[in-house]
Image (cartoon, rainbow, N blue to C red):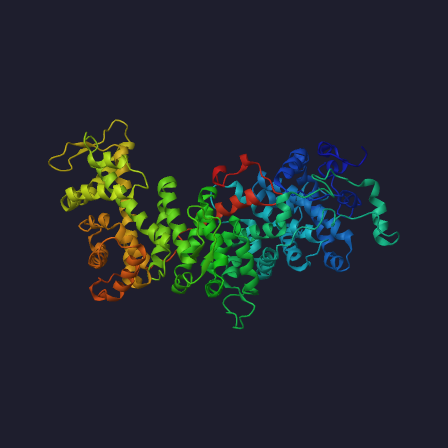
Amino acid sequence: MGANSSSISELPENEYLQKLSGSEPISENDPFWNQLLSFSFTTPTNSADLKLLEEATISVCKSLVEKNPRTGNLGSLIKVFLSRTKELKISAECQNHLFIWQAHNALFIICCLLKVFISRMSEEELQLHFTYEEKAGPSSYGAECEDLIEELLCCLIQLIVEIPLLDITYSISLEAVTTLIVFLSCQLFHKEILRESIIHRYLMHGRCLPYTSRLVKTLLYNFIRQERSPPPGTHVFQQQTDGGGLLYGIASGVATGLWTVFTLGGVGSKASAQLEQCSPLASQSLLLLLVLANLTDTPDTPNPYRQAIMSFKNTQDNTAFSSSNPHAFQINFNSLYTALCDQQKSDQATLLLYMLLHQNSNVRTYVLARTDIENLVLPILEILYHVEERNSHHVYMALIILLILTEDDGFNRSIHEVILKNITWYAERVLTEISLGSLLILVVIRTIQYNMTRTRDKYLHTNCLAALANMSAQFRSLHQYAAQRIISYTCRHLRRYVYVLDKLYFPHSHCSTLQHCFSTLSDNGEELLSLTCSHILRSYASSLFSLLSKKHNKVLEQATQSLRGSLGSNDSPLPDYHFWEMSDCLHFSETKLRHAQDLNVIEEVIRMMLEIINSCLTNSLHHNPNLVYALLYKRDLFEQFRTHPSFQDIMQNIDLVISFFSSRLEQAGAELSVERVLEIIKQGAVALPKDRLRKFPELKFKYVEEEQPEEFFIPYVWSLVYNSAVALYWNPRDIQLFTMDSG
């Protein structure tokens, strides 16, 4: 075998790796480094390759962890890398492969070793491995030793921001970004959020701090450019270069010692389909940007990377920068917008869009002023439409983006002016032509419906309803299907409300009218539903609703407290409650409590949907004949809820509209066509006395991050790194920050 290794299985016996991890110190000037670093190697392109590599070299890494405090070989390797990087910029300009080649190989080994070190020791222990030097005595610390961690971090940042991105520098730029992620990966091995970190301190203070804005800008441009990786082997030194000169002399001196590694897919091998379609550098840069932006503030210094993201401006913006923020910079917003529109299929791109809209007012203003807003909104709607295929965090971010956008009245008006044709991914109905606003309504209602029947997440449906509420006053020319879905979805919850009410308070009735009727109904039995609800509700109506509403909240509160108390003592039974004089005592089990809680959630949804309908009728009735038509079609069910204590106030306007237009339709005679009904509605909208409609406060909801948002975002960001980073692998058994099913 000699000095060469041609397969993974041979790596543990490789003499150069054995010497690196051995007991003898290696000077940074030793020719050994030229031999170690002169290997032809294609950087692994996926975590599976890295897993194979890590498993093959784990014995080497363990040996280095054990012996490095006595040899300082890790420090020597880092110093060799630092010396190689001094020539990188000139090498790139001169198309000189040699220094770039060896610097990349050095950094690759450093990154692999760092990942193992960080996963196995604390930051304090890691720092000792960087600062320890062998002296004349058996062991001592180098008093004058430069801080290699800070030196290396600063060098990596300089490499990213200063080395031009060319085919020959692509791999080392990617490796520099990856190594910074690895440096910060100590968070993965802690359950709690790290608020004090040596690595964080280096990055947010000292020598790294002046590079903050340049690093953020470069990472953003890497994301914007989406540069594909060059053909395999581009960065590898070729021995077939012209003879003579320094390049050939050094190469021939190490040729017999080449570590011609198995190439894990190989130099010249076909890249994976995924990598052919994306940019590893863009993906890795975005992940690093998200990690940096979510570092926690220190007591004396806010996160400078977050400050840079919050304050950068468009290159066309000539206003002066604020002196209070030294990290501001300019970037081309048009290019950024295009990249954001194109990349929304990935969680990390959606998270970046959320951060920019929420934290950078310059970006938010620019996005809201775009005349092609559909290019951004449609990918977000597609995420929500395929909710069952997305993880919950991605859905949250997409929904919150919509909520932020709907805070702007201009957005709410403009989306109804954008006409879309043939939305192929919307499967429920063929939509040959529909406004962006109507499509948004359809997708959000579908998301609420999915959540209410599957995930039952109150946070999700609350934000969906808030987005619809923000839009409601500016509803314009609603598509007939969108109008129908608004009304039918409200009716569905009205029916569900009665059903749960019946199941909760009449569970043992052998002739439970509601339970029997609703168990036989399908979603499409619209006429039967209307007749059933009309018959039942007329018999209960105001007396039952008033009685149950007064009792319900009190019972729910008492039952919840009692159930919580009983969980602490298995011997204490749940108490019985008397609902009203003619009822038996009902034992409030966990099932009953769940029904009672369901009733509260359904009531909340109904109330908000009624407010949304009322807001549209009050502010833009004459623009939405299709909504009035759908409301009249289901008027029997709405009329029965006019006396419900929880909805009585909001039902006044809806009841007025129903009565007004019903009267005009009766006057027009029977057997009216759809077209004739819509014509009567349009004429009546002009004649309706607006002063008779009760005024309600405008529906306006604003997104506000919860306290300590890092408790959500830091695990989320690192789950994205764990699942999406290019050529990074961590043993899942070592991960403490999140559970594997939450990643």
- Residue 317 seen anywhere in this rendered image of the structure: yes
Q: Where is residue 495 in the image (x, y as percent from the top left)?
A: 26, 43
Q: Using residue 417 as the reference point, say whether residue 103 is left or right of it.
A: right
Q: Where is residue 730 in the image (x, y as percent from the top left)?
A: 58, 39
Corner quadrant of residue 598:
top left
Marker count (numbered): 0
Corner quadrant of residue 535:
top left
- Closer to the camera in the image, 8 or 233: 233
Q: Using residue 263 as the reference point, say whether residue 247 is left or right of it.
A: right
- Closer to the camera in the image, 730 or 693: 693
- Closer to the camera in the image, 134 or 368: 368
Q: State the residue lying farthest toward the top.
A: 571
Q: Using residue 412 as the reference point, say whether residue 654 is left or right of it.
A: left
- Closer to the camera in the image, 388 or 319: 388
Q: Where is residue 203 in the image (x, y as percent from the top left)?
A: 57, 54
Q: Which residue is drawn at 47% across and 66% down?
A: 369
User: Image height check: is 60 above or below 238?
Assistant: above
**Which quadrant is home to the N terminus?**
top right
Q: Where is residue 669 in the image (x, y as percent from the top left)?
A: 21, 56
Q: Using residue 726 as the reference point, say whether residue 104 is left or right of it.
A: right
User: Image height check: is 134 above or below 147?
Assistant: above
Q: State the residue lying farthest toward the left.
A: 581
- Residue 302 seen anywhere in this rendered image of the structure: no
User: Image height check: is 182 above or below 311?
Assistant: above
